[in-house]
Image: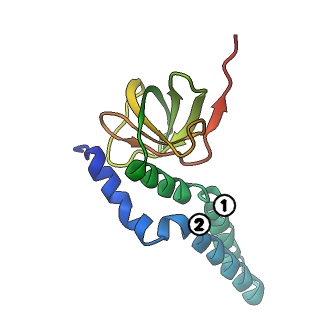
Amino acid sequence: MKSLSIEQQIDVLRPSVTSGIAAHFHHWFLAGAAIAGIAAVVLWHPVPLVIALFLGFVGLAEQKAGPNIVAALNAYDLGTPTPGKVSVTFTDWSDDCHYHVTVHEQGQVDWKYEFVPQGWQPAAQDYAARIWRIDPDGQPVLVTVEDGILIPRYVPTRIEKTG
């Protein structure tokens, strides 16, 4: 698989942001869950209930992913990145892979979050990075490395430095 450039990875996400889908897609999952839940009660059948549970879990689990994509693209277009480095790790299950990054930047606390690679294949290693924030002391909303972009899937976790 040939990796996409950073600009191409950003451009792949733009239509979902400009159309508003990214910011509100989780609402569609939750609405589908509600409709399937009503169907389960009306039909008194377990299949719509299983569908409702699935859609509800996905809608709740992904409620930050879309807004994080919107924030990342806004920061990319309007903000100024700062240099730093990141450490990428991943857990590779037989059918799923979870990527995590720890963001290190001079004068900032470290942050850790899960991300989904968009058009590139990360390795478990340290990378030089450019980091975008909306608030100068806030969490990173976008990190780019030479090969790709790292957008938080959920809310990043602040790592307090000890010592």
Secondary structure beneath disc 2?
A: helix
From the viewer's perspective, is residue 141 above or below residue 18?
Answer: above
Hey, which quadrant is residue 110 in on the image?
Answer: top right
Q: Name the residue under label 2.
A: 26
From the viewer's perspective, is residue 145 above or below residue 6?
Answer: above
Q: Mark 1 points at which residue?
A: 60
**Residue drawn at 51 percent across, 30 percent down:** 103
Q: In which quarter of the image is the C terminus?
A: top right
Seen as rendered, the residue at the extreme bottom is 42
Amino acid carrying label 2: it is: His
Relative depth, front residue between 6 and 44: 6
Is 62 positioned to the left or the right of 19 in the image? right
Amino acid carrying label 1: it is: Leu
Q: Where is residue 121 in the image (x, y as percent from the top left)?
A: 34, 39
Relative depth, front residue between 69 and 153: 69
**Residue drawn at 62 percent across, 68 percent down:** 55
